[in-house]
Image (cartoon, rainbow, N blue to C red):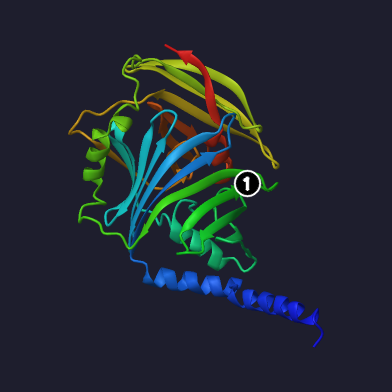
Amino acid sequence: MKKWLLPLLCLVLMVVLSACGAKSQEDVVGDLNKKMDDLTSYKTKAKMTLQMGTEPQEYNVEVWHNDPDFYRVELKNSQSDQSQMILRNKEGVFVLTPALNKSFRFQSDWPKNSSQPYLYESLVQDIMEDPEATFKETEEHYVFETKTRYQNNKMLPMQEITLSKEDLSPVTVKVMDTDRNPLVTVEFSDTEFNSKFDPDSFDMQRNMEGAQLDKETTAGVDEEKSQDEFAVMYSNDAAAKLIEEKMIDTENGQRVVQIYEYQSAESTKRFTLIQETAEVMPAGAMVSTPVNGEPVDLGYTVGAMTETGIQWTHNGVEYMLASSELTPEEMISVAGSVQEGTMVK
């Protein structure tokens, strides 16, 4: 054998052996399937960054999940210390706003009815259900690109999901628009599989009271600001045009009523946006409002969506978007675009 041939053969052998250690997309999907079969619960923390407005918004997210259907998702705005919680237990689905001592209650399939970028099993489902998902392997990660399953938001059609090779835990998720710009980025940390929970870890009353004891959540309403003043918001959706605005005096201060025209591809539609200072319920008098609809993620907050509108609270203000003409996707787009304008007293 010629002297130069032996090193070449060794090099080829090393490449072949390396390739033998690599996993195919089918292998990793099979591992994920087994992971889900063995998974009974988990806890994880994440930082979620939204690029949908004029300035990036950052949220700290903490997720608890206990098989089969119990969830606790806490979202805190790192800039304003606003806090909300999505809770699912045997009584239903709740969206809690601890600073106001209020909650919405749903009879809903959440989170099974849509992609959820901060829920591990939702990401695995996205990977498994997309026959056109792409796959690549890096030194430490498996990276999938899949379609999303957002029922009412076609503006975010795809996502990049990065998993750890070590234990298939989530590392990052980038949810992208049609131009492949990442509008939602979730960076995970401290994932713990098969966690242990107390019997009342998902109890609504306990979680509401616990959140209210947290200084970061009870600081959500500015105590120095008068209850009858707030910053009026406006829709910045490119298709929306404000045509009328009026102020109405109420027992709690001012109510702002705005009427918009919305130019869709088919026709000109109308919607109304109402905003007023949210009433803070006293301790021991929590209000839980039943909603015949679904919880909806607006980016900066979680709202309650019905067939004809969306209701939400943010920074101590209650909002109601109402329209019999807008589609669900258009309502979400409008509600997610609401930005600060001028102060009303």
* Residue at left offset 45%, top offset 13%: 344
Picture coordinates of residue 106, whole percent (x, y):
35, 49
Question: At numbered mark 1, what does the secondary structure look like: helix, strand or loop?
Answer: loop
Picture coordinates of residue 22, whole percent (x, y):
60, 72
Picture coordinates of residue 214, whole percent (x, y):
27, 34
Please indicate whether residue 309 sits to the left or right of residue 70 in the image.
right
Task: Please say if 37 is above or below 345.
Answer: below
Task: Please say if 290 is above or below 114.
Answer: above
Quarter residue 252 falls in: top left
Residue situated furthest top in the rendering:
345
Front one among 336 and 252? 336
Front one among 100 and 320? 100
Residue 325 appears in the figure? no
Quarter of the figure with the C terminus: top left
Residue situated furthest front in the rendering:
3
Say what amino acid the circle numbered 1 marks: Met
Quarter of the figure with the N terminus: bottom right
Task: Please say if 44 is above or below 297.
Answer: below
* Residue at left offset 54%, top offset 26%: 339
Front one among 268 and 121? 121
Picture coordinates of residue 333, whole percent (x, y):
57, 39
Task: Please say if 86 is above or below 335.
Answer: below
> What is the number of callouts on the image?
1
For mark 1, what is the residue?
Answer: 155
